[in-house]
Each structure stands twice: as structure tokens, then as C-alpha cells.
Amino acid sequence: MAEQAQGPKYEVNIEGTIHPWGEDEITPAQIRGLGSLPADQPVVEVNLETGEEKTLPEDAVIELKPGMAFARKVEFKRG
């Protein structure tokens, strides 16, 4: 049986734009690269359900869940 090609199974919302991502974890540096954010800006995680914001430390590793319907409703933005 031939294996099906697997595309990215994660989606990362960076300042309102959805970016496909193929790994189950992402770091602030990777978020900056994916969203073309300036290197000198902190990355902020925004809970879209509560509006709560949290600045991520540079060594943070964010665990992603596949599919937007099952993921935490979060967005990342520059600080």
C-alpha cells in the first residue's frame, strides 16, 4: 500500500493570518520567522476566548494540537 503524502497538520494564527506548520511544537523564534515578525519584538500569546495575553519567554516551547476545531483558540502577535 502506498503512503499518502502528509502536508502540514497544524495551523498557527499569527496576527490574524493562518500559517500551516508541520511540527507539533513551535518556539517564539519560529513564530517570528513564520510570521515575519521583527527579531527584537517579544511574542505574545493571546487567548481568543478570554482576551488574556501572555508574553512568551524566549526558551518557551509551545505544544500545538492538530486542527483548528480542537486546538486552543490562541493567536500570536508581536509584543
Image (spheres, grey):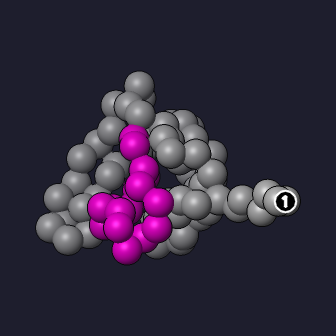
Identified at 38% across, 31% down, the residue is 60
Q: Do we see residue 60 in this rendering?
A: yes
Q: Is residue 68 above or below residue 55?
A: below
Residue at the disc numbered 1: 2
Q: Using residue 4 as the reference point, say whether residue 50 is left or right of it.
A: left
Residue 19 place in picture, x, y as percent: 59, 64
| Residue located at (63% from left, 51% from top) | 22
Quarter placement of the N terminus: bottom right
Nearest the viewer among 32 and 74 is: 74
Residue under the point 26% across and 69% down: 48
Q: Quadrant of residue 8?
A: bottom right
**Secondary structure state at the residue bearing disc 1:** loop
Place of residue 41 in the rendered image (x, y in percent of width and height, measured from the top left) = 46, 42
Horizontally, residue 22 falls left or right of residue 24, namely right
- How many callouts does the rendering have? 1
Residue 62 drawn at (x, y percent): 39, 41
Q: Is residue 16 above or below residue 6?
A: below
Task: Name, please, the residue furthest toward the front.
Answer: 1
**Magenta span has 64?**
yes
Image location of residue 43, percent across then percent down: 40, 45
**39 sits to left or right of 41:** right
Queried whether the magenta region covers residue 78, the answer comes back as yes
Q: Quadrant of residue 51?
A: bottom left
| Three-letter amino acid code of the residue under disc 1 | Ala
Quadrant housing residue 75:
bottom left
Q: Alpha-carbon neighbours of circle 1 within 10 Å: few (<14), some, or many (≥20)?
A: few
The single residue placed furthest to the right in the displayed view is 2
Q: Tell me if I can see residue 38 in this picture.
A: no
Q: Which residues are magenta?
A: 62-79
**Residue drawn at (84%, 59%) of the image:** 2
